[in-house]
């Protein structure tokens, strides 16, 4: 109840099979405790990260001119302006919006009963579908 911290229930109602499955959960962590709220990437240096969805280091950059070939490998949307992370390897074209790189690995949504997990779905180096599935 959102009105207070205490609530009361009849003991017979609390252990009714329609309400309780009989599994004792004392000492089992709550689902919210299992969600990792840590940083979604490893910070290497100022403006340089190692993201779990890519094997090379990524450098934070600011785009000043639109390039039709610059699209985020996370959401597959173009990068028109603003900050993004770009792979530091010369031949690699992997880039992520700063917001996509910072997206949490797990998230709760009010319309879904369970935590949602960010999954990797890369088919190849030129995958235009994005990695957030």
Image (cartoon, grey):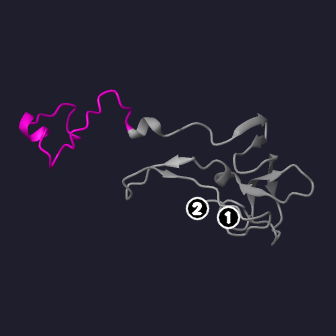
> Which quadrant of the figure has residue 133?
bottom right
112 relative to 82 in the view: left or right: left
View extreme (front): residue: 22
Q: Is residue 27 magenta?
A: yes
Asked if disc 2 and disc 1 are in contact, CB closer than 8 Å, the reply is yes
10 drawn magenta: yes
Is residue 38 depicted above or below 77 in this figure?
Answer: above
Is 103 left, or right, of 4 in this rendering? right
Q: Residue at x 75, y 54 (%)?
A: 84
Q: Kindly report the secondary structure that dominates the magenta region of the rendered protein.
A: loop
Q: Badge 1 is on which residue?
A: 130
Q: Which residues are magenta?
A: 1-30
Camera-nearest residue between 13 and 104 = 13
Task: Using the image, tell me which numbered label, if any, was put on residue 97.
Answer: none
Give the image quarter of residue 23.
Answer: top left
Q: Residue at x 72, y 65 (%)?
A: 123
Count of numbered circles in the view: 2
Measured in 3D between alpha carbons, the distance from the residue under mark 2 to the one under mark 1, in whole angstroms, is: 8 Å
Looking at the image, the residue that sits furthest to the top is: 27
Question: Where residue 118 sits: x, y (%)?
Answer: 57, 53
Residue under pointer 2: 133
SS at mark 1 in the image? loop
Q: Secondary structure at mark 2?
A: loop
């Amino acid at each position: 109840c959102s009105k207070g911290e205490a609530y009361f229930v009849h003991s017979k109602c609390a252990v009714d099979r329609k309400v309780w499955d009989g599994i004792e959960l004392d000492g089992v962590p709550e689902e919210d405790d299992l969600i990792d709220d840590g940083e979604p990437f490893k910070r290497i240096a100022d403006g340089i990260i190692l993201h779990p969805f890519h094997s090379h280091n990524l450098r934070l950059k600011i785009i000043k001119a639109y390039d039709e070939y610059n699209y985020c490998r996370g959401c597959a949307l173009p990068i028109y302006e603003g900050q993004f992370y770009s792979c530091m390897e010369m031949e690699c074209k992997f880039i992520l919006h700063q917001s996509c790189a910072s997206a949490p690995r797990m998230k709760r949504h009010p319309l879904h009963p369970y935590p949602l997990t960010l999954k990797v779905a890369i088919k190849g180096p030129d995958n235009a579908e994005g990695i957030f599935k």
